[in-house]
């Protein structure tokens, strides 16, 4: 009888050790595989062992997020957020204007083609979580599609009229294309949010802005801003930007304020129309 109890006891120990040595790892492995196959894993393998950051769940492989900029109570276009267009989209929008890209001048600043220009712009916007399409269309509006008909000249690499506050004031000059675009992005971020800058500040007018006083494109115009501030004093400034954004993204937008356009000399609707060049004055 005593020998039988000892035998049962040893058998029990053997079964327990079998579960611990074989059953548990198999059970854990199966659970992990099930989690991965069902998309429930919250982490990704870090092969670099450098503590890589997981890609946000909303981000697509192309780098463009599924993000509705107008998903807010006003239906206005938010300035902060992920870009909803690609570099190719922005370059194509420029090329549809049938205007010459100033490659000789901008090559000196590091952007010899519109594709290079849009790539730099996209990188700078993404760093500060500002929508690249907003930066692009503002630069096109401020510079007359990079033709620079106003007081700012192409060699200043100032794509947003920063510091051109009226009269013959030429505004700020920057050493290259990237710095000029970085300053523009930072100035937009100052208007649109209270977040700290990621890069060192190159916008010398950053501290003049009332933070988060214009979180929407529509509020960048002083006359339409409920706080009485904004980027530019011209009537309907933000609405003009929204119309350009609608052209870029292929969406419909009806401006609350009619935007004057130049009459065309042709009645052929298939012929590309030269864009209306609108000068604006940055107020901050």
Image (tube, helix red, strand yellow):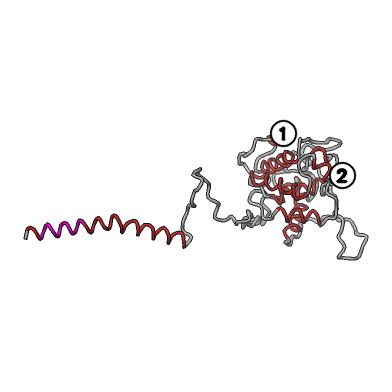
SS for callout 2: loop
Residue wearing tag 2: 149
Residue sitting nearer the eye, 178 or 47: 47
The location of residue 243, given as percent across then percent down, is 76, 56
Residue at the spot 59% in from the left edge and 55% down from the top edge: 59
Ranked by sequence position, the earlier of labels 2 and 1 is 2
Quadrant where the N terminus sits is bottom left
Q: Is residue 234 visible?
A: yes
Residue contact between numbered discs 2 and 1, judged by CB atoms under 8 Å:
no
Residue 226 placed where, x, y %? Answer: 70, 47
Name the residue located 87 percent from the left edge and 58 percent from the top edge: 273
Judged left or right of residue 197, residue 6 is left
Number of the label disc, if any, that sits on residue 13: none
Q: Is residue 100 left or right of residue 45?
A: right
Q: Is residue 229 above or below residue 241?
A: above
Q: Main secondary structure of the magenta part?
A: helix
Instruction: State the image quarter where residue 176 is shown.
Output: top right
- Which residue is found at the position 65% from the left and 47% from the top? 126
User: Within 10 angstroms of label 2, few (less than 14), some, or many (20 or more) residues?
Assistant: some
Res. 200 image quadrant: top right
Residues drawn in magenta: 4-13
- Residue under pointer 1: 204
Where is residue 28? Give x, y as percent: 36, 57
State the separation of the CA atoms marked 2 and 1: 24 Å
Callout 1 crowding tier (Cα within 10 Å): few <14, some 14–19, many ≥20: few
- 218 part of magenta stretch: no
Relative to 46, 142 lies left or right: right
Q: Residue at x 31, y 57 (%)?
A: 22
Seen as rendered, the residue at the extreme right is: 265
Helix, strand or loop under label 1? loop
């Amino acid at each position: 009888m005593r020998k039988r109890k000892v035998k049962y006891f040893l058998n029990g120990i053997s079964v327990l050790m079998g579960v611990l040595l074989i059953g548990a790892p198999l059970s854990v492995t199966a659970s992990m595989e099930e989690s991965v196959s069902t998309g429930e894993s919250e982490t990704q393998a870090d092969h670099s062992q450098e503590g890589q950051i997981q890609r946000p769940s909303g981000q697509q492989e192309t780098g463009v997020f599924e993000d509705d900029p107008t998903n807010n109570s006003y239906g206005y276009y938010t300035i902060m957020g992920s870009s909803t267009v690609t570099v190719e989209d922005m370059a194509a929008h420029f090329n549809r204007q049938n205007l010459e890209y100033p490659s000789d001048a901008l090559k000196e600043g590091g952007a010899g083609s519109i594709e290079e220009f849009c790539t730099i712009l996209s990188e700078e916007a993404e760093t500060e979580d500002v929508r690249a399409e907003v930066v692009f269309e503002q630069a096109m509006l401020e510079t007359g599609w990079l033709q620079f008909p106003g007081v700012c000249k192409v060699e200043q690499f100032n794509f947003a009229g920063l510091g051109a506050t009226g009269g013959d004031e030429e505004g700020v000059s920057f050493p290259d294309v990237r710095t000029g675009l970085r300053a523009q992005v930072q100035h937009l971020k100052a208007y649109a949010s209270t977040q700290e800058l990621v890069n060192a500040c190159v916008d010398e007018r950053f501290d003049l802005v009332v933070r988060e006083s214009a979180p929407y494109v529509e509020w960048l115009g002083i006359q339409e801003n409920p706080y009485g501030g904004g980027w530019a004093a011209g009537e309907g400034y933000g609405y003009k930007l929204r119309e350009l954004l609608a052209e870029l993204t292929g969406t419909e937008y009806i401006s609350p304020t009619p935007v004057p356009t130049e009459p065309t000399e042709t009645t052929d609707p298939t012929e590309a129309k030269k864009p209306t060049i609108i000068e604006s004055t940055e107020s901050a």
